Amino acid sequence: MSRVRPTIEDVARAAGVSRATASRVINNAPGASGPLRARVSAAVAELGYQPNETARALASGRQRAVDVVAVTYGPGPGWLATHPYFSRVLAGMMPVLERVDAQLRLHAVGLRSSAAAIDEIADNAGLGVVLADITPALAVRVHRRCRRTVSLVPTAPSVPGVEADNIGGAYAAVNELHQRGCRRIAAIHGPAANPCAIDRRTGYRQAVDALGLAELSADGDFRREGGYHAAQRLLEQHPDIDAMFIACDLMAAGAIQAITASGRRVPHDISIIGFDDSIAAVCTNPPLTTMRLPVEDMAAAATRLLLEGTPSAGYRQRFPVDLVVRDSTCR
């Protein structure tokens, strides 16, 4: 039998105060003395009370909205509009928010000028904050100021997270190329500060080490242009490459263009596996074999978690990353 969730009336009775006083303390509003606050806080801890954030927002006057934060690693915030990952985050969140008549606010934060912007977002958060793309240090900064926070990317131990298996996905991609007969498997990595890119780089390195292969890699920036130029460098430095693992479908699209421009063919000369399974994967020529990142499912889960209450510190929900085979890998 499921345990009945305690209500604010239960807290008020346990603390021996009125419902209005319990509400003021829980919402951190003025009008309650120190001893009363201590009694209510003790009752909250004893009962395991978790406030309903939708109702709490109405009571406190906060806007009924979930804030989405994305750190921009590119030349400016405009690149967010062209990157498939962020549209998939929004696509996962919107149906959940529509069911409770709540809104979504998207914030693009520059990596170099992020601290002040992060503080303002956290201090004025509505129903909660979803960290779509952020460094662990900045995630901790948000969480310290707003406990109603969930990260969609690998984060610090204390910050609640809904995460995908980036390391395992990258490892599986390299292993798949190896099973198909490829032996000179290069990688194009994402931004050095991006947590997902870091984990995918780790997965690639673990795989080539386990398989006894040479590490051949170049850095990109999660953009098509970055993939194009990184592939050019790899082809010049290692002309015998027979496969590439690319940490983002958008970069993979650029890499296919560079390979084709060099006179080589995909997959006859070089097999490609990307990462994300975004719209870019089915728009390349040939269509891209990739590791599917379940972005929409993760974003929906994070949104539901915030609407249910304040997530506990260190909460984790993990999602697998699956291979999707198309025509960019040799048979």
Image (cartoon, rainbow, N blue to C red):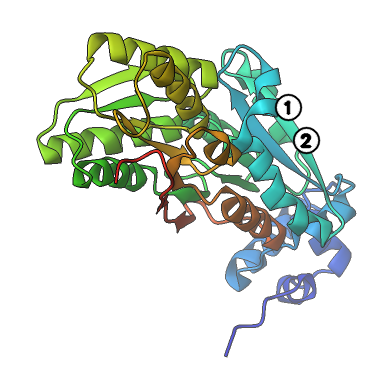
The reply, left or right, for residue 96 in relation to residue 244 is right
**In which quadrant of the rendered image does the N terminus lie?**
bottom right
Residue 166 in view in this figure = yes
Q: Residue at x 16, y 33 (%)?
A: 183
Query: Which of the numbered marks, if any, corresponds to residue 120?
Result: 1
Q: How many marks?
A: 2
- Identify which residue is drawn at 19% across, 28% down: 184
Kindly indicate the quadrant of the structure image that contains residue 252. Answer: top left
How many C-alpha atoms fall within 10 Å of the one at disc 2: few (<14), some, or many (≥20)? some
At label 1, counting other C-alpha atoms closer than 10 Å, the crowd grade (few under 14, some 14-19, many 20 or more) is few
Q: Secondary structure at mark 2?
A: loop
Q: Residue 238 bears which disc, if any?
A: none
Q: Position of residue 293 (x, y in %)?
A: 49, 47
Q: Is residue 109 above or below residue 314?
A: above
Identify residue type, mark 1: Glu
- Relative image position of residue 74 (x, y in whole percent): 58, 16
Determine which residue is flagged by label 2: 124
Q: Judging from the image, what secondary structure is the residue with disc 1 in?
A: helix
Displayed quadrant of residue 107: top right
In the rendering, at what x and y percent does residue 105 appear?
Answer: 78, 37
Residue 309 percent across, percent down from the top left: 68, 59
Q: Residue at x 67, y 51 (%)?
A: 92
Given residues 311 and 258, the one toward you in this image is: 258
C-alpha span from label 2 to label 1: 6 Å
261 lies left or right of 304? left
Q: Using the image, determine if residue 107 lies above or below residue 132.
A: above
